[in-house]
Amino acid sequence: MEIKTIINEIKQKVEVAGGLKALYFVACGGSQAAIYPAKYLMQSEAKNIATAIYNSNEFVHATPAALGEQTVCIICSLNATPETVEAVKLANKRGAITIAMTGSPETLMAQNGQYKVIYSNGDNQVYSKANQALALKLVFEILHQFEGYQNYEAAISAYDKIDNIVDSAKKSLLPKAKQFAEEFKDDEFFYVLGSGPLYGTAYTMACCHFMEMQWKHAVALNSGEYFHGPFETTDKKVPFVLLKSLGRTRPMDERAEKFLNQYAERFIIIDADEIGLDQIDSSVAEFFNSVVMIPIERFFVYQMSILRNHSMDQRRYMWKVAY
C-alpha cells in the first residue's frame, strides 16, 4: 500500500474516533536516530497534533497515558528487535494505529503492524527509499492530509533529487573523507556535534558508526548544549566532528564552529550546505538534512574502517551473545 493511501485510510479511522491527537515515534538505536528527523518535522510544522519520540523498551515500560485510538504510532526496526515488536503489540492493544517500518515483509514488525512500510537497506540502499526518507514522507503526508501543509508539493518533489545529491557528494568529498580517516584513525574518543534536524544524525555517527561499528568511544552533543558544560573538555588534542545543518538551527552550529576555531585544533566540519542540499526547495530543505547527511557521515567513518582494517560489520556482542 502506498504511503498516500495508508494515511488516507488512517485519516478516515481517526476521524471516527474524534480526530488525531498525537503522533508517536518509537524505535531503538540507529532506527530511532533515522526517524528523529520526521519527529523534528512534525514538532516544527504541526499545528494541532502533538508528537514525541520514545526508545522502544521505554515505551513498553513507561507507556504514555495518552496512547489510544486517537494516536498514530510510527514504529521502526530493520530486523524487528524484540523490544520494538513488543512496542507494536502494546500500541495495538491500547487501540492506537500502528505503522511498522521495517526491512522486510517477513519480519515480526511487518506481521504485527496494522500498516507496514518496507524501506530500502543493505549495501545497495536507495537513499530516497531508506527509513529516514520514508519516515519523513509519512509525516509530510500526515501534515498534508490532516492540516493542508502548504509546502507538500515541494517536499514530494525533493525525493527525485536525493540519490543524485548523495552520490555526487560522495565523489566530491572523497578526498576530505580520506584525509579525515588518515588523521583520526588512531584516536579512541570523539565528540560529535549537531543541532535541530541533524541532532539524530550526530547520535547515529557517535553511537552506531563510531561505537558500534568501529569500537571507538564517542559522545553525541546538541550544538546548543555544548556550551552548557561539555565545552570545558575542549582542547587542542580532543577530536570533534561538527555536522553543520542547513536551516533554522544553523546559527547554533556556527556558534560551535566559532568556538572550535578559537580553542580546538583537531576537528572536522561536514556542512550540509556544501553537499547539494541547496538543490531542494528552500521551504523544505531543512527537513532533508539527515537524509543526505547520514550516508555522508557514514562514508567518512567507512574510510577510517578501511585504513584500520576493521569492517563496519564486525561485532563483539550484537547478535552474538544474550542481552
Image (spheres, rainbow, N blue to C red):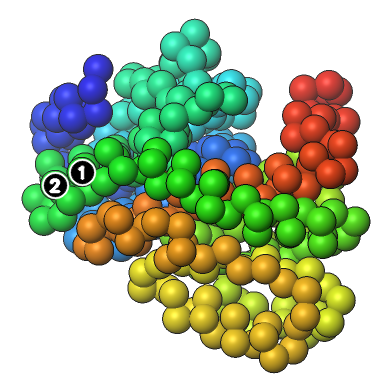
What amino acid type should be assigned to the residue bearing mark 1? Ser
Q: Is residue 304 visible?
A: yes
Dot 1 falls on a residue whose secondary structure is: helix
Quadrant showing the N terminus: top left
Residue visible at 67% across and 68% down? 268
Quadrant showing the C terminus: top right
Q: Is residue 52 above or below residue 229?
A: above
In percent of width and height, residue 101 lies at: 43, 27
Q: Is residue 140 left or right of residue 220?
A: left
Q: Is residue 261 left or right of residue 142?
A: right
Q: Which residue is mark 2?
A: 153
What amino acid type should be assigned to the residue bearing mark 2? Glu
Dot 2 falls on a residue whose secondary structure is: helix
Q: How many numbered callouts?
A: 2
Q: Is residue 68 visible?
A: no
In percent of width and height, residue 232 lies at: 77, 85
Q: Which residue is mark 1?
A: 157
Marks 2 and 1: which is nearer the front? 1
Residue visible at 79% across and 69% down? 239
What is the crowding at mark 2: few (fewer than 14 residues within 10 Å), some, or many (at least 20)?
few
Residue visible at 77% across and 22% down? 319
Residue 255: quadrant of the picture: bottom right
What is the crowding at mark 1: few (fewer than 14 residues within 10 Å), some, or many (at least 20)?
few
Work out whether residue 93 or residue 297 is closer to the camera in this orientation and state it: 297
Q: Is residue 264 left or right of residue 129?
A: right
Residue visible at 52% across and 13% down? 107
Query: How far is the residue under mark 2 from the one under mark 1?
Result: 6 Å
Q: Is residue 178 above or below residue 57?
A: below
Contact, mark 2 vs mark 1 (Cβ under 8 Å) = yes
Q: Is residue 192 left or right of residue 265?
A: left
In percent of width and height, residue 117 lies at: 37, 24
Per the rendering, the mark at residue 123 is none
